[in-house]
């Protein structure tokens, strides 16, 4: 997939998609089968960078807002970023019933 580069005023085509992951960094993991450095979740945005911006360096500001949706979403603000947030459901540990 490709899209316009998300950097303001950049006329290039973006070929590199920006995504976000939350990784297990301490064991035991809250999800059985997920070990250290495995992703608890990963969500891709609809934002792309062109070769020069992907390789030249970027500053990204991350704003985190907790919710109770059991989903992770990513929203990108930048040039041409008009798409709604991308969302993935977060796998949950099955609840044991007596």
Image (spheres, rainbow, N blue to C red):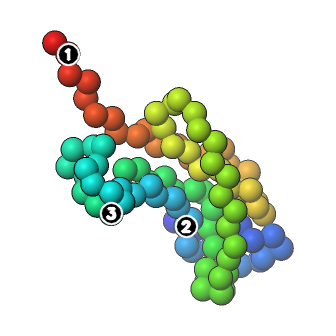
Q: What element carries label 1?
A: loop
Determine the CA span between mark 3 and mark 1: 30 Å
Mark nearer the N terminus (3 vs 1): 3
Task: Give residue 12's quadrant in the image.
Answer: bottom right
Task: Give residue 27's quadrant in the image.
Answer: bottom left
Q: Is residue 65 above or below residue 75?
A: above
> Whole-percent x and y of residue 26?
33, 57
* Callout 3–callout 2 Cβ contact below 8 Å: no
Determine the CA span between mark 3 and mark 2: 21 Å
Quadrant showing the C terminus: top left
- The residue under the point 40% across, 40% down is 90
Q: Is mark 3 on a helix, strand or loop?
A: loop
Q: Is mark 2 on a helix, strand or loop?
A: strand
State left or right for residue 66 relative to residue 39. Answer: right
- The residue under the point 46% across, 43% down is 88
Q: Mark 1 points at which residue?
A: 97
* Res 12 label: none
Of 23 and 9, the residue lying toward us: 23
In the rendered image, is residue 4 in sight? no
Mark nearer the N terminus (1 vs 2): 2
Of 49 and 43, the residue lying toward us: 43
Q: In this view, does 52 lie above or below 78?
A: below
State left or right for residue 54 relative to residue 28. Answer: right
- The residue under the point 26% across, 24% down is 95
Mark nearer the N terminus (3 vs 2): 2
State left or right for residue 44 relative to residue 95. Answer: right
Name the residue furthest left.
98
Q: Which of marks 1 and 2 is in front?
A: 1
Label 3 packing within 10 angstroms: few (<14), some (14-19), many (20+): few
> Whole-percent x and y of residue 36?
28, 61
Q: Mark 3 points at which residue?
A: 37
* Res 17 label: 2
């Amino acid at each position: 997939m490709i899209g316009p580069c998300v950097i303001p005023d950049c006329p290039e085509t973006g070929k590199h998609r920006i995504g976000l992951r939350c990784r297990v960094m301490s064991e035991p993991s809250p999800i059985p089968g997920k070990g250290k450095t495995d992703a608890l979740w990963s969500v891709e945005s609809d934002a792309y960078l062109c070769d020069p911006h992907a390789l030249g360096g970027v500053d990204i500001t991350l704003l985190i807002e907790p919710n109770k949706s059991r989903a992770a979403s990513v929203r990108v603000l930048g040039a041409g970023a008009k798409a709604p947030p991308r969302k993935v459901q977060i796998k949950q540990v099955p609840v044991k019933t007596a």
